Amino acid sequence: MDFQLTEEQLEIKKWAHEFAEKEIRPVADEYDRTGEFPWPVIKKAAEAGIYSMDLYMQSQQDSSGLTLPLVMEEIFWGCAGIGLSIFGTGLPLAALANSGSSEQLFEWAPKMFGTPDDPKVAAFAVTEPQAGSDVSSLTTRATRDGDEWVLSGQKVFITNGGVADVTVVVATVDPELGHRGQASFIVSKDDPGFSTGKKEDKLGIRASDTSEIILDECRIPLDRILGGLEKLEGKLERARKGESTGRSSTALRTFEMTRPSVAIQAVGIARAALEFAADYAKERVAFGVPIAQHQSIQNMIADMAVDVESARLLVHKAAWLAASGQPFEKAEGSMSKLKAGEVAVSVTEKAIQILGGYGYIKDFPVEKWYRDSKIYTIFEGTSEMQRRVISRAVFGTA
Ligand SMILES: Cc1cc2nc3c(=O)[nH]c(=O)nc-3n(C[C@H](O)[C@H](O)[C@H](O)COP(=O)(O)OP(=O)(O)OC[C@H]3O[C@@H](n4cnc5c(N)ncnc54)[C@H](O)[C@@H]3O)c2cc1C
């Protein structure tokens, strides 16, 4: 076991940190206030080669699996809302790469990211007003009509939903079969019947677009089903006979794959808060000494440091397992997401405590990090759902 990062990884980490420090931190507050989508920062990230790095990594042999998490930690250290705008396309990309054919990947991945001069973003739409954690109860329907699929339904809380050129939509083809009757479809914003609805006004990650998607008899060509028609028919046939379909649904599989990437985002926020609080504690004087000399503050800083380090280790292990093609037998992806999400909330909360009144006001960035962190116990599987997955792995009932 070797924990030493290579020269190249250290260089990449430094490069990403400099980008976050120069291009993200200075505008984080403004985008948090306005809730505008940070296209100018995405453009700069595209020019620098950070945006679409997830696409590039698909073609690279990174046996450690650490390059992307190292970059993401730095970017989310800069701002989680902007970070999610830069890396949110990774989620639909994972769905496409995991469940699509190689032809679909070659055709649609470039459309998801656009070009450095004209970057685009993409979305992955699973959640519905009445179905979040319970992915098996989706009601968005996909029905075949000759040479087309007709999609009807409503999706809510979709990251990049209002700004995406391409959206991967999960819909049910056979409602009787629960998640085994579902399939994923590639939908373009220009397809007839596709529209976006309400943009959510959120507690945190406010630079990230979270919007409703409406599919009103949205018509798309037959070949837009991920993995192709034949694969779907085989899967439905086996499900109807009660046989195993082999793998879980696209939605669940995609979330499994992307959990370590989401977890490292939370580590980035937590680290930002730890660093800020430690610097502040060295400067702020109370009772004649810097507060860093008070044992209660030292204890909080120590607990925060242990939490950040342990969350990062879980993420790096899960990323390494995934890169080396090993399954998450102990639900390591869920473990990393659960731990990092909860650490981000508790570390940012302690950072506010260390700053006292200054932690609570908007002149300092700590209250923003606290607001940003909370989503990490909710999206891509709530903490309760992660615990469910982990306990099932322990009990052997997965
Ligand atoms: C900012 C933001 C961005 C998002 N981005 C996307 C996106 O890009 N794509 C997408 O498809 N979705 C997205 N979502 C949706 C998100 O994944 C869901 O909100 C989340 O999965 C929870 O679903 P829900 O909100 O319906 O809560 P519910 O499923 O209704 O859960 C409510 C509460 O009940 C608990 N609960 C439910 N079932 C159980 C159980 N069996 N055991 C124990 N507790 C349980 C939950 O943990 C939670 O505490 C996003 C949401 C937000 C807020």
Image (cartoon, rainbow, N blue to C red):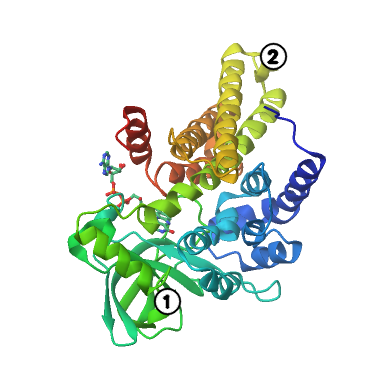
Rendering quarter of residue 66: top right
Disc 2 on helix, strand or loop? loop
Identify the residue at the far left of this view.
176
From where the camera sits, is residue 131 visible? no
Give the amino acid at mark 1: Arg
From where the camera sits, is residue 103 visible? yes
Residue picked out by circle 2: 288
Give the amino acid at mark 2: Gly
Q: Is residue 355 above or below residue 381?
A: above
> For the residues marked 2 and 1, what is the alpha-carbon distance in whole angstroms?
68 Å
Rendering quarter of residue 397: top left
- The residue lying at 60 percent from left, 22 percent from top is 301
Q: What percent of the width, then of the height, locates residue 1? A: 67, 27
Res. 224 mark: 1
- The residue lying at 48 percent from left, 59 percent from top is 98
Q: In this view, does 170 lie above or below 328?
A: below
Q: Earlier in the sequence, mark 2 or mark 1?
A: 1
Res. 324 mark: none
- The residue lying at 76 percent from left, 48 percent from top is 12
Identify the residue at the far top of this view.
295
